[in-house]
Amino acid sequence: MADTIKGKLVEAGNAISETAQKVANRASEKAEEAKNWVNEKLDKAQNRADEAAEKAKNEAEAAKADAEAKDCNKCP
């Protein structure tokens, strides 16, 4: 333990610095967790959008095939 005012100030400064570093590390960890969560949600949303686009494409192709089949039924 420091006996002088200067020593006590140095110890207090060191304690504050260590605490600030711990807080910064914790904030960094939480920010990384949040980023990962957002990326996961974006990936899921993109997958749903891709599935919907594929379904729409398949339905459009099926409708086109049906229309062509109806037109061919009228052919001589």
Image (cartoon, rainbow, N blue to C red):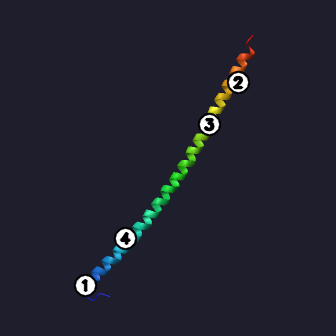
| Residue at mark 2 to residue at mark 1: CA–CA distance | 91 Å
Disc 3 or 1, which lies upstream in sequence? 1
Q: Secondary structure at mark 3?
A: helix
Residue 56 position within the rendered picture, expressed as x and y whole percent measured from the top left: 62, 33
CB atoms at circles 1 and 4 under 8 Å apart? Answer: no
Specify few, some or many for label 3: CA neighbours under 10 Å numbering under 14, 14-19, or 20 or more. Answer: few
Q: Which residue is mark 3?
A: 54
Give the residue number, with chain letter if any, for mark 1.
5
If you read the primary sequence from the N terminus, does the residue marked by circle 3 or circle 4 appear first? 4
Identify the residue position indicated by label 4 in the image: 20
Looking at the rendered structure, the kind of residue marked 3 is: Glu
* Tag 2 and tag 3, C-beta contact below 8 Å: no
Marks 3, 4: nearer the viewer: 3
What is the spatial separation of the Cα atoms under label 4 and label 2, in whole angstroms?
Answer: 68 Å
Which three-letter amino acid code belongs to the residue tagged 4? Ala
Residue 36 coordinates in the image, percent (x, y): 51, 56
Question: Mark 2 — residue?
Answer: 66
Q: Earlier in the sequence, mark 2 or mark 1?
A: 1
Which of the two labelled residues, at mark 1 and mark 4, occupies the earlier sequence position?
1
Left or right of 28? Residue 47 is right
